[in-house]
């Protein structure tokens, strides 16, 4: 179990990574907002045609097709720009992990011994690490999905939403609101992709640097103990994994990998480390029933867990993402009991 200094170093690293993520998210949102502003006039003009006579429907449809094409063109351009911005930010995060990994490893050793550890960690090459991360390649499914799918997918969603809104005779204000909702899908998707790439890159780079240290034997899954953390991650918290295994958290996952090093007694020092705190299972056991229910965020699943029908190790499951591969998430009630059970 990680000691207090290691947990403190890990939390500092987490906050630094999230600060980078917030920075790129702001840039993406600002640029996306500019595109919306450019298209808003077109949507307003289209919405004003909602009362056209039926025989002018073809004209209205032509306007809608034109808007759809314009949305796709704008978002294709945005996706190419966003891809380069996200890749650059991820490279910065990988470089940042050099110091972070050292600090987390150093924190696990008594003062004085840490310097000898650092000598073997300073030769890890950032460019080499990036080249080993398949999802960082411009031709990877992650980056191709962002570039190729964003414009087409969002443009079709916008067109479908507007066509339905007009067909139902909604007023211009309601039509504009529908456009904002559908158009916002693209920003949501790019922000999710951006954050996942950056957090995944940080975790992969950190574990790789652990492997180059010569003293880290494995890594420990570390999840934040708060209501924002899903039960899948709480269940994984405190588990030990080999350096060959990635921390395959879900999209937007904020978990980190802690270094597992020889104990002080294994190093020949006649002293024991002080554990840093409870594992996810131990922490969850301290919560009252209402807090546990909130943590589950699923009443049926919580009731099944209370009844003993869901073992602790079954609270997390894996799924295959077409871009990132295998990822972990909290299991759902339907996963375990099917849709028939969910309806009971």
Image: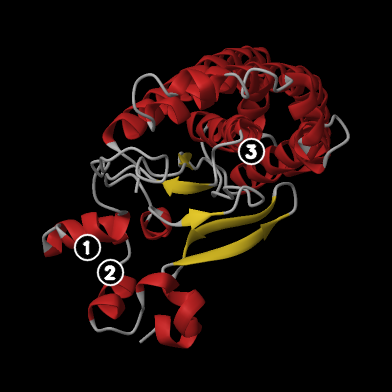
Q: Which residue is mark 2?
A: 299
Q: How many marks?
A: 3
Q: Residue 163 placed where, x, y %?
A: 68, 44
Closer to us: 189 or 237: 237
Q: Which residue is mark 1?
A: 293
Q: Which callout, 1 or 2, points at the residue further toward the start of the chain? A: 1
Residue under the point 63% across and 17% down: 122
Closer to us: 30 or 15: 15
How many residues crowd mark 1 within 10 Å: few (<14), some (14–19), many (20+)?
A: some
Vertical placement of residue 129 versus 157, above or below: above
In the displayed structure image, the side of residue 195 where residue 104 appears, left or right: left
Q: Are marks 1 and 2 in contact (CB under 8 Å)?
A: yes
What is the quadrant of the C terminus in the image? bottom left
Q: Residue 326 placed where, x, y %?
A: 66, 57
Q: Considering the numbered disc 3 on the image, is that residue within a helix, a strand or a loop?
A: helix
Q: Considering the numbered disc 1 on the image, is that residue within a helix, a strand or a loop?
A: helix
Q: Residue 312 placed where, x, y %?
A: 35, 71
Residue under the point 47% across and 79% down: 336
How many residues crowd mark 2 within 10 Å: few (<14), some (14–19), many (20+)?
A: few
Q: Are marks 1 and 3 in contact (CB under 8 Å)?
A: no
Q: CA distance from mark 1 to mark 2?
A: 7 Å
Q: CA distance from mark 2 to mark 3?
A: 41 Å
Closer to us: 81 or 96: 96
Q: Which callout, 1 or 3, points at the residue further toward the start of the chain? A: 3
Residue 211: numbered disc: 3
Residue under the point 13% across and 64% down: 289
Q: Considering the numbered disc 2 on the image, is that residue within a helix, a strand or a loop?
A: helix
Q: CA distance from mark 1 to mark 3?
A: 39 Å
Looking at this view, name the residue that lies furthest to the right: 139
Q: Which callout, 2 or 3, points at the residue further toward the start of the chain? A: 3
Residue under the point 42% across and 24% down: 113
How many residues crowd mark 3 within 10 Å: few (<14), some (14–19), many (20+)?
A: many
């Amino acid at each position: 179990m990680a000691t207090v200094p290691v947990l403190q170093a890990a939390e500092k690293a987490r906050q630094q990574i999230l600060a980078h993520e917030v920075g790129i998210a702001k840039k993406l949102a600002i640029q996306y907002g500019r595109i919306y502003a450019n298209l808003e006039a077109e949507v307003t003009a289209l919405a004003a045609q909602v009362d056209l006579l039926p025989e002018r429907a073809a004209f209205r449809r032509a306007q809608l097709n034109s808007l759809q094409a314009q949305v796709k063109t704008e978002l294709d351009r945005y996706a190419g720009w966003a891809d380069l911005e996200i890749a650059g930010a991820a490279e910065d995060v990988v470089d940042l992990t050099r110091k972070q990994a050292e600090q987390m490893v150093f924190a696990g050793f008594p003062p004085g011994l840490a310097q000898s550890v650092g000598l073997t960690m300073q030769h890890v090459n950032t460019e080499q690490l990036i080249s080993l991360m398949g999802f960082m390649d411009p031709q990877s499914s992650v980056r191709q999905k962002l570039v190729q799918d964003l414009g087409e997918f969002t443009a079709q969603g916008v067109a479908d939403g507007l066509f339905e809104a007009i067909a139902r005779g909604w007023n211009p204000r309601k039509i504009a609101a529908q456009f904002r909702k559908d158009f916002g899908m693209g920003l949501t998707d790019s922000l999710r992709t951006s954050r996942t790439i950056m957090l995944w890159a940080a975790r992969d780079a950190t574990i790789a640097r652990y492997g180059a240290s010569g003293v880290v034997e494995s890594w420990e899954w570390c999840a934040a103990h708060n209501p924002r953390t899903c039960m899948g991650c709480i269940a994984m918290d405190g588990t030990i994994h080999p350096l060959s295994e990635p921390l395959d958290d879900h999209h937007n996952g904020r978990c980190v990998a802690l270094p597992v090093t020889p104990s002080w007694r294994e190093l020949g020092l006649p002293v024991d480390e002080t554990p840093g705190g409870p594992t996810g299972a131990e922490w969850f056991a301290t919560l009252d029933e209402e807090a546990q229910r909130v943590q589950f965020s699923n009443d049926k699943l919580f009731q099944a867990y209370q009844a003993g029908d869901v073992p602790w190790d079954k609270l997390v499951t894996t799924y295959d993402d077409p871009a990132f591969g295998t990822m972990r998430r909290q299991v759902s009630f339907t996963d375990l009991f099917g849709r028939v059970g969910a309806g009971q």
